[in-house]
Image (cartoon, grey):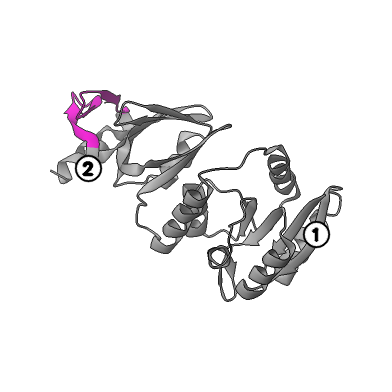
């Protein structure tokens, strides 16, 4: 059985989650908590296999709970209302999450991902720290971002990203050390995390780090400092030219 604890301070949301879990035959709900202090006590006493944890609690955050625990549990699914900063923080850390109101299908898919997980994640502590820092700094672009694929999790410095290239449901990250990382998320996902003015959406398939742009060639290509050329779509051309001109 999968020992599961629910950390949620809204009674209605908590009861809904319990109700949605009723048909999951391998899930055993071992308790719930609604505050930082009670959550810490519950987790320490019961050592759950899986935590369904609200980010915002009445007396603090889920990260306040995790800072009190040693070791920090890995198998956490964060729960949040539609808060753009909380969601962005979770995405920076590539953490699993559910939106309120919790949807049955999304919960089932989340549990399936947990069941298929085999190995410990050596990047876990860094992912949590990255998400926490992002939540605390709100609109400031974090120094690192987590890139997650089917089999790997990598944390890379945002300053090392030359550009991103979308390919359907995938995104290639081209780094300034010459490496290329493939991630199983569409480019739109990262456009939200790497926003203007730091990154330029020059084309339907390209997102470019402005710090590596040296100019624009014939109004058709952005030229990077390493002489690579990135396409500029006709409808974005004037916007890109004006943006680059304004920053000279």
Residue at the image point whose x is 29% and y is 28% from the top? 232
Magenta stretch?
212-233
| Residue 92 point in image, percent of width and height | 46, 48
Residue at the image point whose x is 72% and y is 62% from the top? 6
| Residue 33 point in image, percent of width and height | 70, 70
* Number of numbered labels in the structure image: 2
Closer-to-camera residue (127/191)? 127
Rendered image quadrant of residue 120 = top right
Residue 226 in magenta stretch: yes
* In this rendering, position of residue 85 left or right of residue 8: left
Mark 2 and mark 1: Cα distance apart in space: 53 Å
Closer-to-camera residue (93/225)? 93
Seen in the picture, residue 6 relative to 238 is either above or below; the reply is below
Q: Which residue is mark 1?
A: 29
Rendered image quadrant of residue 225 = top left
Rendered image quadrant of residue 160 = top left
Q: Mark 2, mark 1: which one is toward the viewer?
A: 1
Residue at the image point whose x is 53% and y is 48% from the top? 124
Residue 169 in magenta stretch: no
Furthest residue in direction front, as rendered: 70
| Residue 74 point in image, percent of width and height | 61, 51
Q: Is residue 74 visible?
A: yes
Quadrant into which the C terminus falls: top left
Q: Which residue is mark 2?
A: 243
| Residue 179 point in image, percent of width and height | 36, 27
Marks 2 and 1 close (CB-CB < 8 Å): no
| Earlier-in-chain disc, 2 versus 1 | 1
Q: Is residue 202 visible?
A: no
């Amino acid at each position: 059985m999968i020992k599961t604890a629910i950390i949620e301070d809204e009674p209605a949301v908590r009861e809904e989650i319990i109700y949605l879990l009723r048909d999951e035959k391998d899930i055993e709900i071992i308790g719930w908590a609604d505050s930082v202090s009670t959550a810490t006590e519950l987790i320490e006493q019961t050592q759950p296999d899986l935590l369904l944890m609200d980010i915002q609690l009445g007396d603090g955050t889920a990260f306040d709970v995790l800072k009190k625990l040693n070791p920090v549990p890995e198998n956490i699914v964060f729960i949040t209302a539609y808060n753009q900063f909380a969601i962005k923080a979770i995405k920076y850390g590539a953490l699993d999450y559910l939106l309120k109101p919790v949807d049955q299908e999304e919960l089932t898919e989340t549990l399936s991902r947990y069941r298929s997980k085999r190995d410990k994640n050596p990047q876990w502590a860094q992912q949590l720290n990255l998400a926490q820092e992002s939540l605390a700094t709100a609109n400031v672009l974090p120094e690192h971002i987590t890139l997650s694929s089917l089999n790997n999790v990598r944390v890379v410095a945002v300053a090392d990203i030359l550009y991103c290239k979308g390919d359907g449901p995938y995104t290639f990250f081209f780094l300034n050390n010459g490496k290329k990382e493939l991630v199983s998320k569409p480019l739109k996902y990262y456009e939200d995390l790497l926003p203007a003015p730091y990154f330029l959406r020059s084309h339907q398939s390209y997102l470019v780090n402005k710090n590596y742009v040296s100019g624009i060639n014939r109004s058709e290509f952005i030229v990077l400092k390493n002489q690579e050329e990135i396409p500029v779509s006709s409808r974005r051309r004037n916007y890109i030219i004006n943006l680059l001109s304004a920053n000279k």
